[in-house]
Amino acid sequence: GPDAEVARFLVEQRDVLGELEITARLMITGGEDKEEARMTRADRSLIRQCILDAAEQLVTDEGARHLTLDAVAQTAGVSKGGLLYHFPSKDALLSALLVDASERLLAGGRRIHSEEDVADVALGRLIAFHLDFATTEPDVIRVQDRELATLDEENRHTVRSLQRQYVQVWD
């Protein structure tokens, strides 16, 4: 019943917090304080991107309904606690995945736009960039198409805003 579900939730939360504290240090640093102190923002960013890549692959293969934190952690090669250190929930992970894709497209479009003075050359480079993105990362396109509507309002607004800005780069 509901009381059993609440009890399971509380046990899982307690386990997750303990796992976060222990696993984040052990997994990345081997438990050595000296190694933990050497971790850079880039190291943390790389781990985060590996988790996003694993989530993207799972969503593409199975759909967001089947996306579990355990499956992402296993695919990414991190513990569930390590994953939760970067993404506190499945929704946060999916939102980050879709925002990340939109930010990368916008950044690439803006970079090309700022580098080219000749409109025809800029357009050709934008087309090449977009085709490259679509053909090298088709999973991202599928995830965007399938899962955008499942995001909470704030993240859906963020993704749509980034998409509109990307389209404006083409004007």
Image (spheres, grey):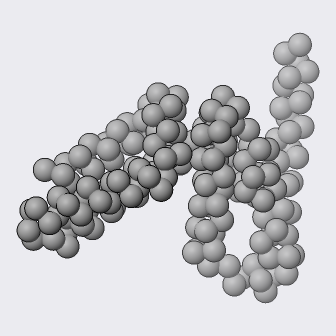
Would residue 22 appear left or right of 131 to someone viewing this image?
Answer: right
Q: In the depicted view, which residue is nearer to us: 50 or 120? A: 120
Would residue 158 appear left or right of 48 to someone viewing this image?
Answer: left
Residue 77 in the image, given as x and y percentages of width and height:
78, 59
Number of callouts: 0
Q: In the depicted view, which residue is nearer to us: 120 or 40? A: 120
Residue 29 seen in the figure: yes
Residue depicted at x 77% and y 44% = 71
Quarter of image, res 24: bottom right
Residue depicted at x 58% and y 67% = 45
Residue 92 seen in the figure: no
Residue 109 in the image, given as x and y percentages of width and height:
28, 59
Residue depicted at x 80% and y 76% = 29
Hey, which residue is sitting farthest top in the picture?
A: 1
Residue depicted at x 72% and y 48% = 72
- Quarter the N terminus occupies: top right
Quarter of image, res 40: bottom right
The answer to whether residue 85 is above or below residue 36 is above
The answer to whether residue 141 is above or below residue 105 is above
Quarter of image, res 105: bottom left
The answer to whether residue 19 is above or below residue 22 is above
